[in-house]
């Protein structure tokens, strides 16, 4: 029983980590909490759903397509709206992304209706010894792990990735070093939207989707960042797995309704006891 | 000074008309005005925390819902009269604000905003879970009572009270400290302001009004369920009202509540699916194009005092 819980927790934890990494990147580089992160994930899920149901493409092959589409959406949002509030007080950026998030959710409701839609592709479980592994969750874990790994390779070893980390450490110094900070903001926002879209695409195969699915992901991604420590990108990995484990353990003792409450209580307690996150401060 | 006197006279006239209104109005008129009062309470309360300190509350409807459930349970299960139950609804909302605000407002940054984003869902889950007390998803029915007109006065008094409190705060040193936190929290700390405590006080004040309004609305409608008292749309509407009218002012939220409520009744009910989309667009547009709202623009153009 405990083994099963640990496995399920780690499986969903990788997904949390990937989606939260996007939010953490925007927060680290632009100092903005993007409230529309979850709704962008929702758009990614719908992209996959329509590619699958209308064109019959294998949903796992649509993951890069969804990422690309949402990269473009993210870049457009940054270019037209978000860049205007980068240096504004927090109130402006929070309200602006909140407005964007409401507009996206309601636009989706208008265009796609609020019907639940499912990508019925990979159902059932593989049984390995005493454990049952949900097929779609396992594949999602592999994808999320690989994409998160790629993201870290990108941040750690490429010139662009280093520029992103430099901007997140100090915008002024990055500028002095000849980094085009506006361009970095643009790419970061697009990248974050793409990571959210990958999450959405993978979730669409696991559970039925609807326009309001995203909001809870904004909240959970933020919780992951707080767990790992804001501005600390590897912390997102730890935070994601931890949130997955805690939710699974909680679901052993509580109804599904209350396991949502557990995540919330966790946030409040962490803020009370250790507001800098479990791994501590900023280290990029 | 004469301008001030004229404004006070006009205000007294408006209050007198509203007080006499139920005597000659239609049922619909009373109900609609009651709704406007409710929106004034909600918008002005949101303005107290978010407009004055700059800390955005994305879940203020949680206090409305908490007050509604506290009031409804006291009326339905404990047989309280509605007026003390409404006050108890306000107290319940303030207690909830204390539990959330203490850990989240000690910190600078977006923690508070995100914590409020999740609060609503949590309360909805809790209400559904404790079925014995709240009736769960089936909702909670209150004994029938036709009290629309007394509730009209109670809600009107609440709206007046919140507006008066806002005026008192904005013209006081306490209000100046809150606005200092909004403009530059580090500077506020350096000047010796206990920012955590000030933010918490503003937050507690901002929870009381929605709690009372929630309990009054529950009594008036006679039936509540989780979906009806915790809708995200209510938070969105109060935010839009304040931003449109002018955040951080006394009369901005009132202006926003009246104008947007009328617009909603007259125009947008015909397009039920477009109007939430429009609200999102209004938030984006106001933040980018007129961050001070309508009243803020008027203040600058006509050199009105900062304290209106």
Image (spheres, coloured by chain):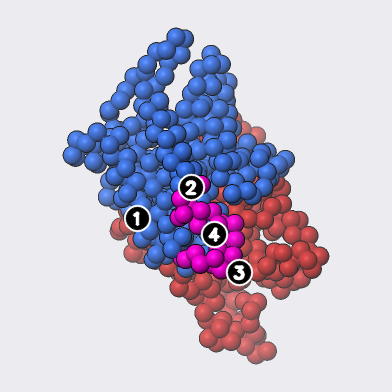
Task: Report if the CB atoms under discs 2 and 3 are less than 8 Å apart.
Answer: no
Q: Is B94 in front, or is B98?
A: B98
Q: Colour of chain A?
A: blue
Separation of residues labelled 2 and 3 (CA atoms): 47 Å
Read off the chain for label 2.
A
Separation of residues labelled 1 and 3 (CA atoms): 33 Å
Disc assigned to residue A157: 2
Question: Which label sits in the foreground, 1 or 4?
Answer: 4
Q: Horizontal placement of B63 versus B99: left or right?
A: left
Question: Which label sits in the foreground, 4 or 2?
Answer: 2
User: Residue B120, can we see it?
Assistant: no
Task: Report if the CB atoms under discs 3 and 4 are less than 8 Å apart.
Answer: no
- Same chain for labels 1 and 2? Say yes or no: yes
Q: Is B226 in front, or is B84?
A: B226
Task: Provide the residue designation for mark 1.
Answer: A73
Helix, strand or loop for disc 4: helix
Task: Provide the residue designation for mark 4.
Answer: A167
Read off the chain for label 1.
A
Name the spot of residue B45 as percent of width and height, x first.
61, 59
Q: Residue at x 60, y 71 (%)?
A: B249
Instruction: Confirm whether the magenta stretch covers residue A160.
Output: yes
Name the spot of residue A97 as percent of width and height, x first.
47, 57
């Amino acid at each position: 029983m405990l083994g099963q819980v640990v496995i399920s927790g780690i499986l969903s934890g990788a997904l949390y980590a990937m989606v939260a990494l996007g939010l953490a990147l925007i927060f680290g580089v632009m100092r903005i909490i993007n409230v529309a992160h979850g709704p962008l994930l929702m758009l990614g899920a719908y992209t996959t759903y329509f590619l699958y149901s209308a064109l019959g493409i294998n949903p796992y092959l649509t993951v890069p397509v969804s990422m690309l589409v949402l990269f473009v959406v993210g870049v457009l949002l940054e270019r037209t709206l978000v860049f205007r509030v980068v240096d504004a007080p927090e109130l402006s950026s929070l309200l602006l992304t909140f407005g964007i998030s409401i507009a996206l959710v309601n636009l989706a409701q208008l265009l796609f209706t609020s019907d639940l839609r499912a990508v019925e592709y990979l159902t059932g479980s593989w049984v390995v010894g005493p454990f049952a592994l949900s097929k779609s969750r396992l594949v999602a874990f592999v994808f999320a792990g690989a994409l998160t790994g790629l993201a870290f390779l990108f941040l750690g070893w490429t010139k662009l990735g280093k520029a992103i980390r430099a901007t997140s450490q100090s915008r002024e110094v990055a500028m002095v070093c000849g980094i085009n900070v506006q361009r970095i903001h643009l790419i970061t926002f697009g990248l974050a939207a793409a990571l959210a879209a990958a999450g959405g695409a993978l979730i669409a195969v696991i559970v039925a989707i609807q326009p309001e699915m995203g909001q809870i992901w904004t909240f959970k991604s933020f919780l992951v960042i707080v767990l790992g420590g804001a501005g600390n990108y590897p912390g997102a990995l730890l935070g994601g797995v931890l949130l997955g484990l805690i939710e699974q353990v909680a679901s052993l003792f509580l109804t599904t309704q209350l396991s949502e409450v557990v995540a919330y209580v966790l946030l409040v307690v962490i803020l009370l006891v250790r507001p800098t996150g479990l791994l501590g401060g900023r280290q990029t | 000074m004469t301008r001030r006197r004229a404004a006070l006279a006009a205000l007294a006239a408006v209050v007198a008309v509203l007080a006499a209104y139920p005597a000659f109005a239609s049922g619909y008129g009373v109900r609609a005005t009651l709704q406007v009062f409710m929106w004034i309470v909600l918008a002005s309360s949101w303005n107290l925390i978010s407009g004055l300190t700059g800390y955005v509350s994305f879940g203020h409807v949680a206090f409305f819902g908490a007050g509604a459930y506290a009031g409804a349970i006291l009326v339905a299960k404990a047989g309280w009269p509605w007026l003390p139950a409404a006050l108890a609804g306000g107290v319940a909302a303030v207690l909830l604000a204390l539990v959330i605000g203490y850990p989240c407002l000690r910190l600078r940054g977006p923690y508070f905003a995100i914590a409020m984003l999740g609060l609503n869902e949590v309360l909805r889950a809790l209400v559904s879970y404790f079925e014995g007390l709240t009736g769960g998803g089936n909702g909670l029915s209150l004994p029938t009572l036709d009290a629309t007109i007394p509730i009209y006065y109670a809600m009107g008094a609440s709206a007046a009270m919140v507006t008066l409190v806002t005026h008192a705060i904005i013209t006081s040193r306490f209000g100046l400290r809150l606005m200092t936190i909004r403009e530059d929290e580090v500077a506020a700390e350096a000047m010796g302001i206990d920012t955590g405590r000030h933010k918490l006080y503003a937050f507690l004040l901002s929870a009381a009004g929605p709690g009372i309004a929630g309990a009054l609305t529950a009594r008036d409608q006679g039936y509540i369920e989780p979906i009806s008292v915790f809708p995200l749309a209510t938070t969105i509407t109060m935010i839009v009202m304040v931003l449109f009218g002018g955040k951080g002012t006394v009369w901005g939220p009132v202006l926003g509540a009246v104008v947007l409520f009328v617009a909603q009744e007259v125009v947008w009910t015909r397009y039920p699916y477009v109007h939430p989309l429009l609200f999102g667009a209004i938030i984006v547009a106001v933040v980018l194009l007129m961050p001070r709202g309508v009243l803020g623009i008027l203040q600058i153009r006509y050199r009105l005092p900062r304290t209106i």
